[in-house]
Amino acid sequence: MKQSVALITLGVSDYERAKSFYEALGWSPTLEIEETAFFQANGVVLVIWARDKLAADSGIADDGASWSGITLAHNVASRKEVDDEIEQARRNGATVTREPSETFYGGYAGVFRDPDGHAWEIAHNPGFGLAPDGSVILSLD
Amino acid sequence: MKQSVALITLGVSDYERAKSFYEALGWSPTLEIEETAFFQANGVVLVIWARDKLAADSGIADDGASWSGITLAHNVASRKEVDDEIEQARRNGATVTREPSETFYGGYAGVFRDPDGHAWEIAHNPGFGLAPDGSVILSLD
C-alpha cells in the first residue's frame, strides 16, 4: 500500500450548511456532483458528503458520534494567521475548543470544530517547513 | 484560509500496535518523535499519536467513539490492487466493513477499519485521474 491519502471525506448532516461554512473560510469546490463537494487541496482532496450516505457506503453502522480521534491540521506561516483563522472560523459558526496558545512542541495553535464537529487545528510550527501550497515539509530529502 | 490540509492525526490507543499495523501495510515513518509517527504522504502527512493526548491537545472531551463521519480514501490504479490491499489489511488485523465491490459511481472499492477503528476506503475510480504519488486528479487545469 503506497504511502498516500487520496481523499478525506467529511460526512455532514446538512450539505448546504457545511459547504457554506467552508466557502466562508475561503474554500471553493473544485468539482460538485449531486451534493458532493470536492475541494482540491495540496495533493489530497477534501470531500463533503452526506454522513448517512458515507456510513452506508463504508459499511459502518453510525451511532452519530461526535469525535472518533481524528484531528485535521492546517498549518500557517505565523501566529497572527493562527489567530485570524480561528476568529474567521468562530465568526462563521465553528466552536473553538482550543483558544490559540503555545504548544508543547514550541509552536502556537488553536482548534475549532466545524458545524458537524470535525476538528481542525490551525497551527504555526516553526520546527517544520511549510510549502507554498500549505504542505508541511518534514525533511528536505 | 488556504485550501490545504497539512496533517491528518489519527489518535490511537496503543501506539506500537498502530505503528506496526501501518508498517505491515508497507508504510514507513518519515520521522518519529516520542511515540509520534509522521508518515509523509502525497503533500499531506499522516500522524499516529496517542488518542488521549490528541483529545487533550485539541480541547475535546473524548467519549471514546468509534466513527464520527470521516473516511479516508486511498486510490489505486486497478481493481486487483483494491482486492490485494483489502486482503493485506485483513491479514494484518483490520476489520473489513465493505468487501470490494462495484460503487455507485462506476468504480470499485472496499473499506477496512484499522485497529483503532479509523476507516480507509481502498478505491479504483476510473472517472478520476491518479498521479504517480497516489493523489487523485480532479481536473487538469
Image (cartoon, coloured by chain):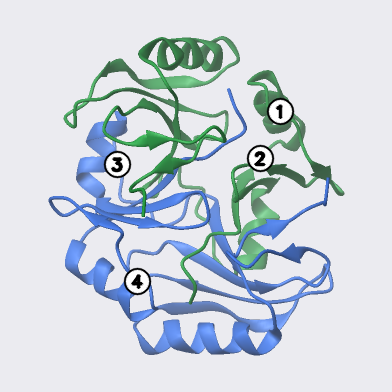
Chain colours: A blue, B green
Q: Secondary structure at mark 2?
A: loop
Q: Would you name the residue on which mark 1 appears?
A: B17
Q: Which residue is mark 4?
A: A22
Q: Quadrant of the N terminus of chain A?
A: top right
Q: Which mark is residue A62?
A: 3
On screen, residue A132 versus residue B3, left or right, reads: right
Contact? badges 4 and 2 (CB < 8 Å): no
Do the residues bearing badges 4 and 1 touch, measured as CB atoms within 8 Å?
no
Mark in the foreground, 1 or 2:
1
User: The numbered mark 3 sits on a residue in which chain?
Assistant: A
C-alpha distance separating marks 4 and 2? 31 Å
* B71 sits to left or right of B116: left
Question: Looking at numbered disc 2 in the image, what kind of residue is underneath it?
Answer: Ser
Q: Secondary structure at mark 4?
A: helix
Instruction: Count the labels in the image.
Output: 4
Q: Position of residue B28 (x, y in %)?
A: 75, 31
Amino acid at pointer 4: Tyr
Q: Nearer the viewer, residue B31 or B49?
A: B31
Quadrant for residue B22, please give it. top right
Question: Which residue is rendered at x = 52% and y = 56% of the image?
Answer: A42
Is residue A14 visible to us here?
Answer: no
User: Label 1 neighbourhood size at 10 Å, few (<14), some (14-19), many (20+)?
Assistant: few
The residue under label 2 is B13
Closer to the camera in the image, A58 or B130: B130
Marks 4 and 1 sit apart, C-alpha to C-alpha, by 35 Å
